[in-house]
Image: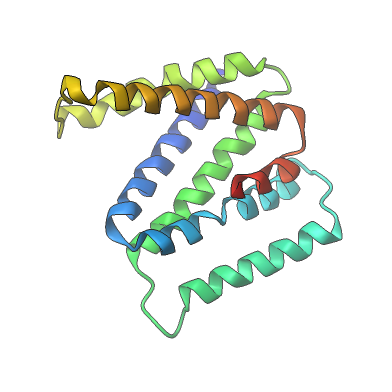
Amino acid sequence: HLPLFVLRAVLAYVAMLLFVYAIGNMPLAEMTALQFTLPLCITLAAYLVLRERVGIHRLIALFVGFSGVLVMLRPGFMEVSLAAILTLLSTVLYSGSHIIIKVLSRWEPSNSIVFYGFVLTVPIAVVPLFFNASVPGWADAPVLIGIGLFSTLAHVGLVRAFANAEASLVAPFDFL
């Protein structure tokens, strides 16, 4: 299932790049609010792609949630910024990555999904270093190790959650 692993790595990496761009180019509160559309995108994708049964309560929540996004963006009243559009694109790409986790979990153990996610993302992530890199100092090591440790634990939890439950059920826990 290598093509799915590669697609997942590319989607997640591009989503992260767009997310980082948005952090630097729009108010953090607005960016975070838009990023919270991720559970809505996952639920919609689970319904359309995975054919998960989504009850009336989840469908109403989807409608209300997407209506809230329109209110946040205020189309017609203000110019929608590039950063806002890229934030929403980031959530769509992340939701694709999460749906692929669910698909891969049909055939692959959770640890393999986590492992290959990292193995395939690293070569992609190294490319920008050739164009604009700065080497962190030793003083940064504890923070970087902490980020790596907690990111890995979060990734393991995310993959195991999607492997063991419906994507539309797991997605709202992102709000926690």
Q: What number of labels is visible?
A: 0
| Residue 175 sits above or below residue 149 on the image | below
Residue 21 position within the rendered picture, expressed as x and y whole percent measured from the top left = 31, 50
| Residue 44 sits above or below residue 99 on the image | below
Residue 151 position within the rendered picture, expressed as x and y whole percent measured from the top left = 46, 28
Q: Nearer the viewer, residue 52 or 156?
A: 156
**Relative to residue 48, is residue 4 drawn left or right?**
left
Residue 147 position within the rendered picture, expressed as x and y whole percent measured from the top left = 38, 28
* Residue drawn at (36%, 77%) of the image: 79
- Residue 85 visible in image: no
* Residue drawn at (57%, 51%) of the image: 38
* Residue drawn at (60%, 45%) of the image: 174
Q: Nearer the viewer, residue 171 or 99?
A: 171
Q: Nearer the viewer, residue 80 or 171?
A: 171
**Relative to residue 170, is residue 111 drawn left or right?**
left
Q: What colour scheme was applied to this rendering of the protein?
A: rainbow
Residue 71 position within the rendered picture, expressed as x and y whole percent measured from the top left = 54, 76
* Residue drawn at (55%, 55%) of the image: 36
**Relative to residue 47, is residue 139 drawn left or right?**
left
Q: State the image quarter where residue 55 is shown.
A: bottom right
**Relative to residue 114, is residue 139 drawn left or right?**
left
Q: Residue furthest bottom?
A: 77
Q: Nearer the viewer, residue 8 or 114?
A: 114
Quarter the N terminus occupies: top right
Q: State the image quarter where residue 22 is shown.
A: bottom left
- Residue 44 visible in image: yes
